[in-house]
Amino acid sequence: ILCIASFRSFSLPLSMQSAVHVTHCLPLQVEKYLEPFQLSLEMLQEVSARLRKDLIRGLGKRSHHKAPVKMLPTFVRATPDGTEKGDFLALDLGGTNFRVLHVRVEEEEQRVLKMNSQICAIPKEIMLGTGEQLFDHIAACLGEFLESQKLKGQTLPLGFTFSFPCEQLGIDKSILIRWTKGFNCSGVEGKDVVKLLKEAIHRRGDYDIGTVAMVNDTVGTMMSCGYRDQNCEIGMIVGTGTNACYMEEMKHVKRVEGEDGRMCINTEWGGFGDDGSLNDIVTEFDVEVDKTSINPGIHIFEKMISGMYLGEIVRLVLVKMTKDQLLFKGQMSEALRTPEQFETKLISEIEDGLDNTKKILTTLGLDWEPVDACVVRLVCDTISSRSARLCAAALATLTNRIRTNRKLDHLKTTVGVDGTVYRKSLNTSLSRLPFSSFSIELQKAVCLLAPRCDITFLVSEDGSGKGAAMVTAVCACFLIPAFILATFPISV
C-alpha cells in the first residue's frame, strides 16, 4: 500500500500536490521555480543506474583513480558479535564540533556499560588554519577530557572517526585525499592523519594513547548500530555532509588482495556527479552554491543533499522569487540578502507548521503576508524532498547491489543512520501535514527504488564515535586478522 501511494505521489509534481493541499491562492509562477527540483521516479531510477556504474569504477584496480565515487577500502571485515570488552577512547571529528569519548564494554552484559563524552568546538580560524594548529587543538581537548575522567595515567586504545575522504592503507594509517565540509587546513592533504594526531600528542608530552583504529563516520555508525542489530550492513550519514558505507564481497574489491569474505567499503558518494554525470538535474541554484563554496566542482551530490548547503539553496530560491516580485512585495531583508544566513535547521522548523514559518520570517526581518508563508513552506518542502529522494536513490543502489551480489531473490537488511538532517526529521507533528518529513520521504522512495529489499532504519544512539570504539574493541579482542585486514596490501 505504501509503495502504491508513493507511486501516485511521484506522478504529480510535488509542489503542485502541496499547493493543492496548502492553499488555492499560491501564484502559478511559483511552479516554474520549483519544477527543476522535482525528480520523477524514472529520473531517480536513472540516477541510481549512474551511481551503480560509478561504484564499479571506484572498486576497479585500474579505474578507481578517475572515479568520482572513490569506494575506499576500510579494512573492516565484519560487524560486532557481542563478545567485545574493555575500556576504549574515541575521537569523532566530522564538522564544526568534535567529540571525545570514553567507552567501557562488558562481554557478560553484551552492552556498553559506560560512555562519557565531551564536545569541543573547532573555531573557524582553526578550520582554515594549519594542520598543526588543528591537531594541537584536538590533542589539547583530548588531554582535558582525560584529566576530567582521571584517565591520564592510562594508555588506552583509541578509535578515530575522521569524516573526510581518506585513502586507508591500514586500520591505523589513513591518507587525507581532500578536505570537505568547510575545512581547509594546510599541510594535511596527502598526509597520514593518524601520524599527525600522534605527533600532536607527543608535542604535549603529558599523556599517551595506545593503538589507533581509523574509522570513517559511516563505518562508525554501522558498527554502533551493528552492536545492537547484527543485520546492519550499511552505515549512512545525512548531516553536515552525506556519505555511506556497506559490506562488499571481497572478490569485487580489486585493490585489496584476497577473494574470500567481505569488506566494508566507504563509498564517499558525496563525490557522485563531480565528473558532470548529474548536470541534467543540477539547478541554477545548485550551480551558485557550488561556485561560492570552499571547494568548487567537488562533492556535487553532497551539495544537493546535505545540511551544510540546503539552507543556502532555499535562500537563493527565495531571493530570486523576491526579486521577481513573487514574495514579500519584492522587499528583501538584510538576513535574506546575506549568504548562509538562512540556516538548514530552519527548513525542518518551517515544515513543522505555518505558525513556525511566520515566526521565522519575522525573525528574519521580512514583511510577510499569509501567502508568503505558504510559498516559503512549499519551497522548503520541495528542496528537502529532493534531498531525501536523491539520498534514497543512492541508498537503493547499495541495497540492490548487496542483494544482487549474494544472488538473493529478497534481501532483509538494516541501515544504521546518523546526521542532523535525518535526526531532526524524526520529530514530526500533525501540523507538518501535508508535508512529509525527510525520513518518511526517504523511506517511501527507497520502497519504490529497491522493491525486493526489506530495509530497517536504525538511528545510531551514540553517534559514530561509539562505533569507532567498537572497531577498536574488536581489534583489541581478536589478534587474528579475520576482522581487520591491517596487513593486507592495497593497490594505490
Image: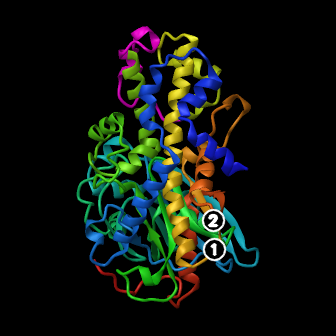
Image color mode: rainbow
- Rendering coords of residue 395 (x, y %): 52, 59
Residue in view at x 58 percent, y 24 percent: 19
Residue in view at x 54 percent, y 30 percent: 15
Residue at the extreme left: 187
- Rendering coords of residue 239 (x, y %): 50, 48
Q: Nearer the viewer, residue 372 or 344?
A: 372
Q: Nearer the viewer, residue 339 or 265?
A: 265
Quarter location, residue 109: bottom right
Whether pointer 2 and pointer 1 mark residues with C-beta atoms closer than 8 Å, the reply is yes
Q: Which amino acid lies under the numbered mark 1 shown in the image of this protein?
A: Asp
**Mark 1 closeness class: few <14, some 14–19, many ≥20 residues within 10 Å:** few
Q: Nearer the viewer, residue 326 or 230?
A: 326
Quarter location, residue 456: bottom right
Residue picked out by circle 1: 409
Residue in view at x 33 percent, y 82 percent: 490
- Residue 256 higher or lower than 389, as above or below: below
Residue 337 belongs to magenta span: yes
Q: Which amino acid lies under the numbered mark 2 shown in the image of this protein?
A: Arg
Secondary structure under tag 2 reads loop
Q: Along the horizontal axis of the image, is 50 left or right of 6? A: left
